Image (cartoon, rainbow, N blue to C red):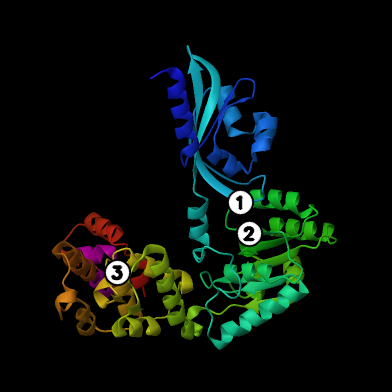
Amino acid sequence: MDNQKLLNIYKYIVEQGDTGIRAINLDGEFIVYNGKMRELEGIDEIDFENHRAHEIIDFESDQSEIFQVLQSGKQLTNHKKIFWNKKNQEVTYISNIYPLLEDGEVIGAVEFARDITQIELMMYRPLRRYGAPLTFDIITAVSKVMKEVIQKARIVALSKMPVLLIGESGTGIDMIAEGIHHDLSNPNQAFINMICRRDEETILNQLEKQIIEEKKMTFFAERIEYLSIPAQEHLVSLFEQHPHHDHMMIASVGKDPIDLIQEQKLSKNLYRLFSSITIYVPPLRERKEDIMPFINDYFQRHRENYGSAIQALSPEVKELFLNYTWPGNLKELEALLDEMTTVITNETTIEMHLLPPHFKWKIQHVMQTDVEESSELFIIKNSSDIRPLDHYMKEVESYYITKALDFHDGNISKSAEALGIRRQSLQYRMKNFQIDAKQFTK
């Protein structure tokens, strides 16, 4: 095979891969800049053709990681980068950057970037799997309190006044915020989600760039109390400096804002900015009517997306779900459904034996069942309860460890002594079975 054919094959592989790749030479010119990397950077084809590397990369030469490697000749690996690209999309990737050497001399640098944007968003915003804009029509809400939440949110969308959403993590506040954005009577051109648990300097820098733009945007500051007080004050000053722009401002906090102010976690000035309209999004335990509709919606999407046959919960599992308090709200419920559906094959119903062991233990403690009642989870009633022996033995071992910790109020040393094993061995098993001793401490 001649060199040209090999070159064409290499080019095809580079362009078709899921890894972003870019390489530059000493003159700041692109040697390689594949489609995935252009997608991550938000670079159109015409921009790529007409500009040099240092003009496209949105950093000064002495600050950009690839230029640092080019100048130092030292590789940079597992570097996590969060930024807003040229199309105002938040992007997160992990990259490895290496110097290109010829006869021991640096002649360029190459970067390989793995896109983890969606993984990162799922960590903070797990209720994002609908594959469509999150409008109010998509949100599963049959309870009276959630219908009132959506009604208030629709009014906010009409007025376009700053709004503060109040509620625990995992309640779906991000869905309400995006629902407001899509319901605006005078539509905005972009929805900018600022996850305040991350780097606040990056958030503020991006906000400074975008708030002065002429196009209208919806800014959603998620869990704004995680920003430092100086950062919150800076955010207020930015909004006050640019009142003429027709932006939509939405923020959320995890609990009563007055309590947060007293705890010095929320700026009074920031609260005044958003306090004209506040919407409380109740936790799942206060609106259990939404549990089954959410599950049914999840199963429908699972059948459509994965071709499964799953239809419903068994009566026993349904009763458990409706009596559980769901401290992690919809986030916890969806994570549990994810875990169960990964092990189904042709089942149409979620039976008790499909519940993960950690959830069985949690349910037992929350509902305050005694040892005899709890042991029912391990009784074999019919052939559907039979599962692989190693899986069953792990459940029994984990259950036994959990009860030992429970009886000793989470004291690891006493529990290990009672079980006849070393403390380190018990800690290893707890880590393996994801058991937290703190939940047993009285």
Q: Spatial distance from mark 1 to mark 3, Cα to Cα? A: 34 Å
Please identify the quarter of the rendering in which residue 271 is found.
Answer: bottom right
Q: Nearer the viewer, residue 290 or 77?
A: 290
Residue 41, compared with residue 27, is above or below; it is below
Secondary-structure class at tag 2: strand
Q: Nearer the viewer, residue 214 or 202?
A: 214
What amino acid is at disc 2?
A: Asn
> Which numbered circle lies on residue 356?
3
- Magenta range is 402-416
- Per the picture, the main secondary structure of the magenta-coloured stretch is helix
Magenta residue check for 405: yes
Q: Is residue 56 visible?
A: yes
Residue 283, compared with residue 89, is above or below; it is below
Please identify the quadrant where the N terminus is shown: top left
Q: Nearer the viewer, residue 203 or 293?
A: 293
What amino acid is at disc 3?
A: Pro
Q: Which residue is mark 1?
A: 90
Dot 2 or dot 1: first in sequence order is 1
Dot 1 or dot 3: first in sequence order is 1
